[in-house]
Amino acid sequence: MTILGIETSCDETAAAVCKDGEVQSSLVSSHIIHKHFGGVVPELASREHERLLNTIVQEAVSKAGIALDTLDGIAVTQGPGLAGTLLTGSCFAKGLAQGLAIPIIGVNHLEAHIYANFLADPTLEYPFVCLLVSGGHTQLWQVKELGEYRLLGDTRDDAAGEAFDKGARILGLGYPGGPEIETCATTGNENAVEFPKAFLHTDSIEFSFSGLKTSLLYKMKSEDRSKTDGLSKSDIAASYQKAIIDALISKCVLAVQETKVKTLVIAGGVAANQQLRETVKMQLPECRILYPDLPFCTDNAAMISFLGEKYLVKGNSTQLDFPVFPNLTLA
């Protein structure tokens, strides 16, 4: 079965072709226009998707070495995400599906991030625990089967990816914030500043990053007033990154202990952070740790087409008039 995947949940216009569980092509165009604003501007993102989609889809199909009329189905992100960008992608996909007279399926973006780990290692077996960590979500899930999930823990306020983005803005770094802070932190002392880590010493599996951001803001304001403590921006960035990672990993340990599962997968854009990858291995040495290849950590259409094929093979599809759900949840 050959499936075209389309992803437009935020600021990446992406298309991919998956055939019998193998990715044949995957293209992503990130909207650099948002760098000027330090974050995603929804209206601009929608316009960029509209401008790029036709070209990206044609290139993905061509790179896969197939013709449009050989597609067996189309998978498109239904949510969560920005309402306008989701509508742009779904309307394009619906028109193409109708023109080709093939089934279409709306895919949960969060679920697709989890299943990107099967692209990295097809031997991954159920059950497993997933740390789903991105700009919009920080959650721990127990994945029992396809479509069967149990939420173990969530964030009370901001997501880890959002904390990276806003932290980078406070530090005067670029966007997206995760890679910018990671690069800045490479020459810093991660123990230079003791930032707060909410719920670190509790048995509850939950996260909170709003207090951490506020602490960073006050720290940078104090640094502006006084330069006597000898801290560099790299020291502060490294300490801030460590606080986020420590909070994430401490709850991964609790989730593994609670479920008694021996496999942990990390999904979402923050999974690309190398410090997170190295630290989780040290903290959970007896666990099998998996994460997607770097191109499949951030938003992409390969994970959409891959998961869409799984559901279409089972006979699942979506009515052509399906709505988008900006606040779609996993379970």
Image (spheres, rainbow, N blue to C red):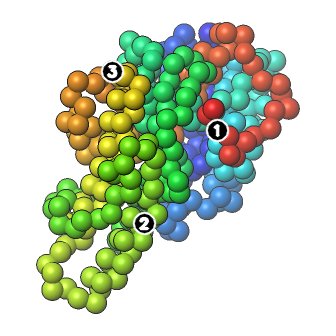
Spatial separation of the CA atoms under disc 3 and disc 1? 25 Å
As drawn, the label of residue 204 is none
Residue 163 percent location from the top left of the image: 43, 59
- The answer to which of 161 and 204 lies nearer the viewer is 204
Q: Nearer the viewer, mark 2 or mark 1?
A: 2
Sequence-first tag of 3 and 2: 2
Determine the secondary structure under disc 1.
loop
Relative to 330, 200 lies left or right: left
Sequence-first tag of 2 and 1: 2
Q: Nearer the viewer, mark 3 or mark 1?
A: 3
Q: Are marks 2 and 1 in contact (CB under 8 Å)?
A: no
Spatial separation of the CA atoms under disc 2 and disc 1? 25 Å
**Residue at numbered disc 2:** 211
Q: Tell me if I can see residue 320 in this picture.
A: yes
Q: Tell me if I can see residue 71 in this picture.
A: no
Residue 135 percent location from the top left of the image: 50, 51
- The answer to which of 307 and 202 lies nearer the viewer is 202
Who's the residue at 48% across and 27% down the image? 142
Q: Amino acid at mark 2?
A: Gly
Q: Amino acid at mark 1?
A: Thr
Residue 300 percent location from the top left of the image: 52, 36
Who's the residue at 55% across and 29% down the image? 150
Q: Residues within 10 Å of mark 1 (few under 14, many from 20)?
A: few
Vertical comparison of 136 with 189: above or below: above
Determine the secondary structure under disc 2.
helix
